[in-house]
Every structure is written in C-alpha cells, then in structure tokens.
C-alpha cells in the first residue's frame, strides 16, 4: 500500500519537476523543430543501436527533416544542432562564446584544461603564449622533421607497393603523424613508425579509441555511469592516462634540466650529438613562458603538451588519409600534382631536403588538400556551451544549451557549394588561375560560398592554432608519397564515421605502385 502511494504521488511530482526544469528552455525554443522528447530521457532512446557510422546518417537526416537548426534533449541537457553559416558566424566570431560544450569533458582526465578545454582568462593567456610557436621561423625548423618522418613513411610503405593489393593506410599514417607531433611538440623521438607497440604510442592510440566509444554512447559520457557499466574499460582508461602523463612529465623534467644547463653554459650546449643546432619545440616555449610574472607549473605545461599530442596527430592523420584516398580515385588530379611536384621539388632528386619555400610553392596541392578537407573535415563537429541567453540572427537560444556546429553537413551544403559531393580542387583556385592549375570538364561554381560555410579548421578567436602547421605537414607527407608511388584506386569505398575525428568504419584503402 505504501509503495502504491509513493508511486501515485512520486511519479506525478517527478513529471512536474521534469516539466518545470525544461519549461523555460522549451518556451524559448517554441519556434525550433526537433524529435519529440520523452520525460526524463529526452531523445536518448533514439541513439540506441547507433554507432559512429549511423550517427553521421542520423544527424544528416535530422537536418533534412527539421531544418538547419534543430534541437534534441539528452536527459535534461538541451543540445542545438546548427548548419547555417550565418548562424555559425554569430557564435564562432564572438569573443564571448568561447566555452566548449560538455562533450569535450570526456577528454578532461587526459588533457586537463589546456588550450582545447580552457575558457575565459586562462584560455586567452595560454593562446597568447602558444601563438608565437607557429611563427614561420619556428615552422621552418619543423619542416626538417616533417621531411625526415615522411621519408621513414616511404620506407614503411615499400612492402605494400606491389601494384595490385589494397591496404588500409590510416593506421600507418597515424604512426607518422604521432612521430611528427612528438618531436615538434616535445622535442622527443618516440619512433612510433618503427616501434608501434611502445607503451606511450599504444596508450595514445587506445585512449583515442575509448573516448570515441564514449562519445557515440550518450550514457557513457556521464563518468559515474561509464564506471558502473564498463568498469574494466574505465580501469584501462585510468591506466592509459597514467602512462601518458608519466611519459610527458618525464620529458618535461628532462627538457627543463636541459634549458637550465644551456643557461648555465651559454650557447655551447645548444647543439645535439651531431653538432646541429637544437630545434625549438613547443615544450621549450612553455618552459620559458610566464603569466603575470610567474612560470607555468609542470601540470600547466603537461596539459598543453598532451593537448598538442592529441590534436596534432589524430586530426592530421584523418586529413592526410582522406586526401590520399581522393587522389588515388582521381587520376587527372594525381597527374597534375606530380607535374607540380616535379617542377617545384625536382624530378630526379627524391631524397633532397624539402624547404618551407618549396612547400609554399605547391599551390595546386593546397587546392587538393582544401577540397579534401571540405569533403572530409577531420573534426566533423565543434561545440560551444552557452552560459547566457543568446540571440542568433533573431532566434533566441537559452542559457545552458550545448550548441553544436555540424561541419560535415555544412561543408556539403548544396546551397553553398555546386555539386557538393564531387571532388573539385579548382574550387579553391585564385581567380584566373583555374586553367593553369587543372584541366577538367568541371567549372567553378557560379556562387561564392558564405565565408563561414568552409571552415574545416573552425573560425574566429578559437580557430585551430595549428592550421599552418597542419597544412605544411600534409603537403610534405603527400608530396613525398607521390614522388615514390602511384596511388591506385583499389579497395572498398570508405564509410565515414563520427568520432572525435572523422574516421572510416572500414578503414581507408588504396593500392601503391613504385614509380
């Protein structure tokens, strides 16, 4: 009898509570469409059975059904999904709306509140410190690292170059990108390409996969629920984070001692064992930086290094792999790229060092990369959290909303791009340069897309700080591959899947033939 009374009284009270905590937000969003939401659960049940691949299709279908701005409820958390570049510009260009949404919290135990996760004054101060790291003088030093690691990649790919067998290139490129970011961010070689089973290398790879799984399953985003339903995976996550933090902290300690010795000995100790001047790494910039006259703590520095290790290998792996795939499927584009590479880098000197100036001269390569990034943005969604009511082009969105920009859908919007699903590098040629860049039967789109329709590196104050770094790295890796191999259209088509970065559910396949 008591239980019956509790049910009869408790359930209506809970329903009323649920209604009241949502009421203001629902009233404010009366104009916005979205799937019908259940009490308490919201739209969580719609995500049952979805994986990263089907989530992509679900998001695109919702855009078609509900328009370029729609809402969903995940429990009592409101999310607004947007693909209108005019709306996106309002948010991304604002210096106020810089707080990332709650999906990013999955990375807090690993990355802390580094540049990716921080907000407010901390973010502004960190951005100011790190920005000089990407000055062209420092990027010029990094080109040597791009080139050396690309040469190792070429060696690793020789075994696959039989001209007839398809293989998945994504994990191979991933190891190359990890080698590059470890040496440029930390000044340390991890030899990922030759020793992929090293604990740190394995930990970065496994941790990325765990976060991807949690991202796709909304109930696992809540930490206590994740630990309840997946205790073994949670324990593994904790161990992986410890492995990565221990490694990073050891490198920080080593580099700090090196800088102290350099200051004590003067310029004599600024050279490596081969007598070459040591390059400046991101870590060195952080070790010498101050905020309000105080140096950064080891924890502060570790957060930024870990952030760069994550952002600097997963995103470029996606960008390079999908671009290589597109080149393999478009023979005319590949031939034009090869001609440009021969003109800029030389036809016979495959082993000659590449320079920053060389990479900047690869104009058509840049068009190809930009078009691939449009079709396959490495970061398929980006998000903000509103701490106050926001007016977006006359549409009020309430405080507490997780605002998500669907880059994957936006970059394929037929209202902004002619034939949006076709690979057309000439879209990005400067006016009057199309004919000299590529000869195809396609024409440039008559309309110019909105400036915020093509933002694979995001935009505004929180745009990707490393986009020049990424473009140079992609140019170097792809040009070295094309110098040595013909890319062949072998293997299955990729099946894009949504995760922290854009991946393919079945890998990214192609074949190679030695030139």
Image (cartoon, helix red, strand yellow):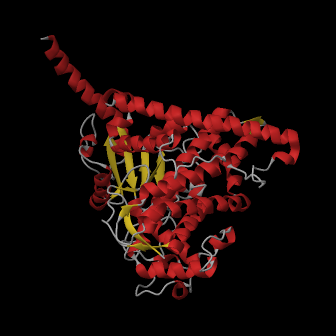
Query: Residue 73 appears at what percent x and percent y?
Result: 32, 42
> Residue at horizontal 63%, vertical 50%?
183
Query: Residue 157 appears at what percent x and percent y?
Result: 47, 63
- Residue 293, by quadrant, is top right
- Residue 364, by quadrant, is bottom right
User: Residue 507, relative to residue 251: is it above or below?
Assistant: below
Quadrant position of the N terminus in the picture: top left
> Residue at horizontal 86%, vertical 48%?
267
> Residue at horizontal 52%, vertical 60%?
153
Q: Nearer the viewer, residue 29 or 463?
A: 463
User: Residue 76, relative to residue 277: is it above or below?
Assistant: above
Q: Is residue 394 visible?
A: no
> Residue at horizontal 28%, vertical 53%?
54
Query: Residue 514 appears at what percent x and percent y?
Result: 46, 73
Q: Is residue 116 visible?
A: yes
- Residue 286, by quadrant, is top right
Q: How many marks?
A: 0
User: Residue 215, relative to residue 245: is it above or below?
Assistant: below
Q: Nearer the viewer, residue 271 or 183?
A: 271
Q: Nearer the viewer, residue 294 or 196?
A: 196
Residue lying furthest top = 2
Residue lying furthest left = 1
Query: Residue 319 appears at what percent x and percent y?
Result: 48, 61
């Amino acid at each position: 009898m008591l239980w019956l009374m509790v049910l009869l009284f408790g359930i209506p009270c809970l329903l009323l509570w649920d209604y009241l905590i949502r009421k203001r937000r629902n009233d404010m969003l009366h104009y916005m469409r979205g799937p019908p939401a259940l009490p308490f659960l919201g739209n969580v049940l719609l995500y049952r059975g979805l994986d990263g691949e089907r989530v992509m299709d679900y998001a695109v279908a919702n855009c078609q059904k509900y328009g370029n701005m729609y809402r969903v409820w995940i429990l009592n958390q409101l999310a607004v999904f947007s693909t209108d570049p005019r709306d996106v510009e309002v948010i991304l260009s604002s210096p106020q709306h810089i707080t990332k949404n709650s999906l990013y919290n999955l990375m807090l135990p690993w990355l802390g509140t580094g540049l990716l996760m921080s907000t407010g004054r901390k973010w502004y101060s960190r951005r100011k410190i790190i920005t000089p790291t990407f000055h062209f003088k420092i990027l010029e030093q990094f080109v040597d690292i791009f080139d050396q690691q690309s040469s190792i990649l070429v060696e690793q790919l020789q075994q696959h170059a039989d001209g007839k067998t398809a293989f998945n290139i994504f994990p191979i490129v991933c190891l190359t990108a990890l080698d590059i970011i470890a040496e440029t961010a930390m000044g340390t070689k991890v030899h990922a390409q030759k020793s992929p089973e090293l604990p740190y290398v394995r930990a970065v790879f496994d941790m990325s996969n765990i976060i991807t799984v949690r991202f796709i399953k909304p109930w696992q985003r809540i930490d206590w629920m994740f630990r309840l339903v997946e205790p073994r995976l949670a324990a593994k996550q904790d161990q992986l984070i410890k492995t990565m933090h221990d490694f990073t902290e050891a490198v920080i300690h080593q580099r700090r001692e090196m800088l102290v010795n350099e200051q004590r000995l003067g310029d004599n100790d600024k050279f490596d064992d081969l007598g070459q001047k040591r390059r400046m790494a991101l870590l060195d910039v952080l070790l010498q930086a101050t905020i309000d006259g105080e140096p950064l703590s080891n924890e502060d520095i570790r957060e930024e290094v870990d952030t760069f290790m994550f952002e600097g290998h997963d995103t470029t792996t996606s960008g390079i792999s999908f671009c290589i795939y597109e080149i393999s499927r478009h023979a005319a584009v590949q031939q034009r790229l090869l001609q440009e590479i021969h003109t800029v880098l030389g036809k016979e000197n495959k082993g000659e060092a590449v320079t920053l100036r060389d990479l900047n001269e690869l104009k058509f390569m840049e068009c190809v990369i930009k078009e691939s990034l449009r079709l396959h943005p490495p970061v398929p969604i980006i998000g903000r959290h509103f701490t106050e009511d926001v007016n977006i082009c006359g549409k009020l969105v309430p405080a507490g909303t997780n605002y998500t920009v669907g880059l994957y859908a936006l970059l394929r919007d037929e209202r902004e791009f002619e034939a949006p699903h076709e690979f057309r590098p000439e879209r990005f040629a400067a006016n009057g340069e199309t004919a000299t860049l590529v000869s195809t039967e396609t024409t440039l789109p008559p309309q110019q897309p909105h400036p915020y329709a093509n933002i694979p590196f995001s935009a505004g104050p929180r745009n990707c700080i490393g986009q020049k770094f990424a473009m140079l790295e992609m140019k170097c890796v792809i040009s070295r591959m094309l110098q040595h191999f013909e890319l062949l259209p072998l293997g299955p088509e990729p099946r894009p899947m949504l995760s922290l970065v854009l991946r393919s559910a079945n890998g990214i396949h192609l074949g190679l033939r030695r030139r």
